[in-house]
Image (cartoon, helix red, strand yellow):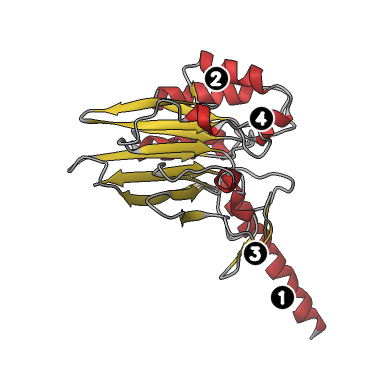
Amino acid sequence: MIKKVAISVLLLLALTIGYIFFDVNYTKINYLNLESDKIPKGESLKILQVSDMHNKKFPNANKKLFKLIRQSEADLIVITGDFIDGKTKDFTYIYSFVDKLVKINPQIYFVSGNHEWRTGRNTELVEGLKGKGVKVLNNRSEVFKKENFIVNICGVDDSYTRHDNFEEAIKGVNNDLYTVLLSHSPDLISRENTSFVDLILSGHTHGGQIRLPIIGALVAPGQGFFPKYDKGVFDLGSETKLYLDSGLGTSTIPIRFWNRSQISLITISR
């Protein structure tokens, strides 16, 4: 009897470890469809969100990850912070990753996260990304032009470390256009009136990294236990939606559970 129990426990432990390894290392695309009257009839905008990679290297030299990115056929790619980890000393890998990303789609937008600031070398990283053609939207905005329409792409620097300047980010923005705001942390929504923004894309929480069925995330930075804003779509009232991507990598502990590594393809149409 004791032997059977021991074998069962070891088997369960092995399955759990295998499942955690799968969640951490084998990325999926999460698909999200949204609607807006600000998008012309018959048109759509496809945004690929990459968040919280934390300088992680995936199996087979990221081949499957880049294959997923190609398959998405996104109009633009947004990187919502924590591209590197706070302990990252060498940017060689991340610059190589960006070089490959730009070849797939040159329309790449970036905002810093708390881990970029934690390195003490955020300015150096930002300049390096700009040199490779990445559009850095730390407290500023641009318009993205598709064939028959344009949208606002705004970005704030990391709000978790209080480097954000929302007013500067939206200065001169045409409110009649569909507006996307990139903000690494969802903390911004508790301090700013984002009611004219149509879609806020954030990360930071990692979906809690460890999740349980029904319960969801156990803990998230800045929100404590059982966070309200952990992963997925949240309606903030009016026409504003917040989407929290649970990201690619891990932080603190290299574990994901019930929370597979992911990138997200957001399609906005009429």
For marks 3 and 4 on the same chain, the one whose residue lies earlier in the sequence:
3
For marks 1 and 2 on the same chain, the one whose residue lies earlier in the sequence:
1
The total of numbered circles placed on residues is 4
> Residue at the spot x=74%, y=45% of the render?
252
Number of other residues with Cα within 10 Å of mark 1, as a class: few under 14, some 14 to 19, many 20 or more: few
Q: Which residue type does callout 2 highlight? A: Leu
Q: Which residue type does callout 4 highlight? A: Glu
Q: Looking at this view, is 208 or 157 the one in front? A: 157
Asked if the residue under mark 3 is in contact with the one under mark 1, i.e. CB atoms within 8 Å, the reply is no
Query: Which residue is situated farthest in the bottom direction here?
Result: 1
Q: Looking at this view, is 237 or 145 the one in front? A: 237
Give me the disc on residue 116. Answer: 4
For marks 3 and 2 on the same chain, the one whose residue lies earlier in the sequence:
3
Q: Looking at this view, is 134 or 238 the one in front? A: 238
Viewer-nearest of discs 1 and 2:
2
Give me the disc on residue 68. Answer: none
For marks 4 and 2 on the same chain, the one whose residue lies earlier in the sequence:
4
Q: Which residue type does callout 3 highlight? A: Leu
For marks 4 and 1 on the same chain, the one whose residue lies earlier in the sequence:
1
Q: Position of residue 97 (x, y in %)?
A: 54, 26
Q: Which residue is mark 1?
A: 8
For marks 1 and 3 on the same chain, the one whose residue lies earlier in the sequence:
1
Q: Which residue is mark 2?
A: 129
**What is the secondary structure assignment of the residue under circle 1?**
helix
For marks 4 and 2, give the CA distance: 12 Å
> Residue at the spot x=56%, y=70% of the render?
214
Give me the disc on residue 15. Answer: 3
> Residue at the spot x=46%, y=39% of the render?
49
